[in-house]
């Protein structure tokens, strides 16, 4: 009987046998990356249409800017730097091992597995795969079943760009994803919710498969009273409303100096109206991906309102948050939120923005530190000393100062969570390292002092005494 487990295992066995015949060298990796770039260009229009259809409405410009451009730039960066990443690196040997020499090199792990996410179904599926390919691995990809049309196009792209024993794409529902997590892979990379991340890690643990988990959490944006509020809010709302807030590093809530709530609300209305003059029928405003997520967001608003929050729809016109037309949820501010409200307990993943007032910077920092460590932290302040204070006193996956999101576009910076927001990191050289084994190598000479480091120990006591005296200086 052919089950998801048996068919996936057969695919893995084929890829593992191919890898055993020889890992790809640098030129083969660069050609593979170039082939992927060409396939992405060939299928670009199909990808744009598929993502739009999966969301029930997403601007092609957002898919180009937030998914396809980063992928092409990531491929360009990897191909340009691959020679340097792969070179051996000499290190100094300790004095008691001289004249030995030592170095380390990065070796591919074998067959890596990638489980993609639905919110950026192209980038968060193929982005980790680029790092795995650059590191010399063979790769199995499982796109999200919540973006099925995009998953189908990704499968065509993989078929066009790679031999099936090098990179394979497997599609299917939650049963396939569960079976995928159970495979004895050499590395498993998952992007998604914390809840599913627990399940993926449990499955991987049965095989001692190393994992990278890119999760999420409630990423705060702190605005200092000295910073221009309009400039801060324009950047926060731009990040919050891209993909209608369905972004793991979208600002989840704002910490605002007390007394500036009315100004914040007025500016937010003006900024949103400039970006989105209307919502219904506006191709620039992304819809919520499915009915379940749409209902979840409406329930968050209802719960906050019932517990005393002031809910402010800042969408243009008369379109209320309760409208289900095309799964549109308008930009919505929530003032007076408390920890008892669901909207402050879980990652929002939508265009709802709680605003929490604070009196001192110490209070704002304490508020962040009293909660699980977020995937991203945003701080708006031109004062270098206060910037350093916030950096020193908080913990998060990444930080952007005076803007939002864009730390993840830095190829020379790692991207990843910490604690509940994930483990491990990728992007650029850090992604190459994630999918590699940093293997140490020592080469001993024909004549070496280590010949003295053997029994009988009574004759070597003087040498041990000398070594201890030198080491304890």
Image: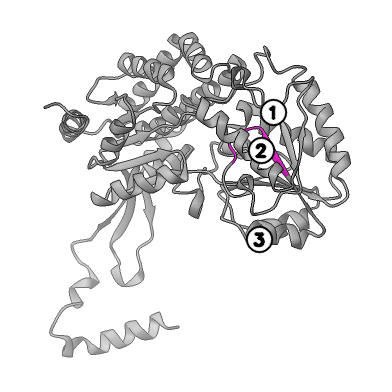
Q: Which residue is mark 1?
A: 321
* Image quarter (top left, top right, bottom left or bottom right) of the C terminus: bottom left
Q: Earlier in the sequence, mark 3 or mark 2?
A: 2
Instruction: Check disc 3: other Cα within 10 Å, few if <14, some if 14-19, many if 20+.
Output: few
Q: Which residues are magenta?
A: 348-354
Q: Position of residue 400 (x, y in %)?
A: 66, 43
Element type where label 1 sits in the image: loop
Residue 77 seen: yes
Which residue is depicted at the point 28% across and 24% down?
168
Figure coloring: one colour
Separation of marks 1 and 3 at Cα, in angstroms: 39 Å
Separation of marks 3 and 2 at Cα, in angstroms: 34 Å
Q: Which residue is mark 3?
A: 392
Separation of marks 2 and 1 at Cα, in angstroms: 8 Å
Above or below — where is 466 with respect to 393?
A: below
Q: Nearer the viewer, residue 87 or 462?
A: 87
Which residue is depicted at the point 65% across and 27% down?
329
């Amino acid at each position: 009987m052919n089950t998801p487990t048996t068919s996936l295992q057969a695919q893995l066995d084929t890829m593992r046998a191919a890898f055993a015949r020889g890992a790809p060298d640098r030129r083969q990796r660069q050609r593979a990356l170039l082939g992927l770039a060409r396939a992405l260009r060939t299928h670009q229009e199909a990808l744009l249409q598929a993502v739009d259809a999966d969301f029930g409405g997403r601007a092609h410009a957002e898919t180009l800017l937030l998914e396809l451009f980063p992928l092409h730039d990531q491929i360009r960066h990897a191909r340009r730097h691959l020679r340097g990443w792969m070179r051996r690196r000499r290190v100094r040997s300790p004095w008691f091992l001289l004249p030995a020499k030592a170095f380390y090199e990065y070796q591919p792990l074998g067959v890596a597995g990638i489980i993609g996410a639905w919110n950026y179904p192209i980038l968060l599926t193929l982005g980790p795969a680029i790092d795995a390919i650059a590191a010399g691995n063979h790769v199995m990809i499982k796109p999200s079943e919540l973006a099925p049309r995009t998953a189908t196009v990704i499968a065509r792209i993989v078929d066009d760009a790679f031999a099936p024993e090098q990179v394979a794409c497997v599609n299917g529902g939650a049963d396939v994803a569960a079976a995928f997590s159970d495979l004895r892979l050499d590395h498993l990379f998952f992007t998604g919710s914390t809840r599913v991340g627990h399940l993926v890690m449990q499955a991987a643990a049965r095989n001692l498969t190393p994992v990278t988990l890119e999760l999420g959490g409630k990423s705060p944006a702190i605005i200092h009273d000295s910073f221009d509020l309009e400039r801060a809010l324009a950047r926060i709302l731009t990040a919050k409303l891209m993909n209608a807030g369905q972004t793991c590093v979208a600002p989840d809530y704002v910490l605002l100096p007390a007394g500036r709530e009315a100004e914040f609300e007025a500016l937010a209305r003006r900024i949103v109206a400039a970006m989105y003059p209307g919502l219904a029928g506006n191709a620039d405003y992304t819809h919520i991906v499915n009915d379940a997520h749409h209902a979840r967001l409406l329930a968050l608003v209802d719960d906050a309102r019932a517990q005393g929050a002031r809910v402010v729809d800042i969408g243009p016109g008369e379109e209320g948050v309760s409208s289900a037309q095309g799964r549109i949820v308008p930009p919505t501010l929530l003032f007076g939120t408390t920890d008892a409200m669901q909207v402050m307990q879980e990652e929002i993943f939508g265009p709802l923005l709680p605003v929490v007032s604070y009196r001192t910077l110490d209070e704002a920092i304490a508020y962040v530190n009293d909660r699980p460590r977020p995937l991203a932290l945003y701080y708006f302040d031109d004062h270098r000393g206060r910037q350093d204070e916030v950096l020193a006193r908080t913990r998060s996956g990444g930080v952007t100062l005076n803007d939002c999101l864009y730390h993840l576009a830095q190829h020379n910076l790692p991207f990843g969570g910490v604690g509940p927001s994930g483990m491990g990191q990728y992007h650029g050289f850090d992604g190459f390292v994630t999918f590699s084994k940093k293997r140490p190598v020592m080469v001993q000479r024909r004549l070496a002092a280590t010949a003295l480091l053997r029994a009988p120990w009574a004759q070597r006591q003087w040498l041990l005494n000398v070594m201890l005296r030198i080491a304890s200086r």
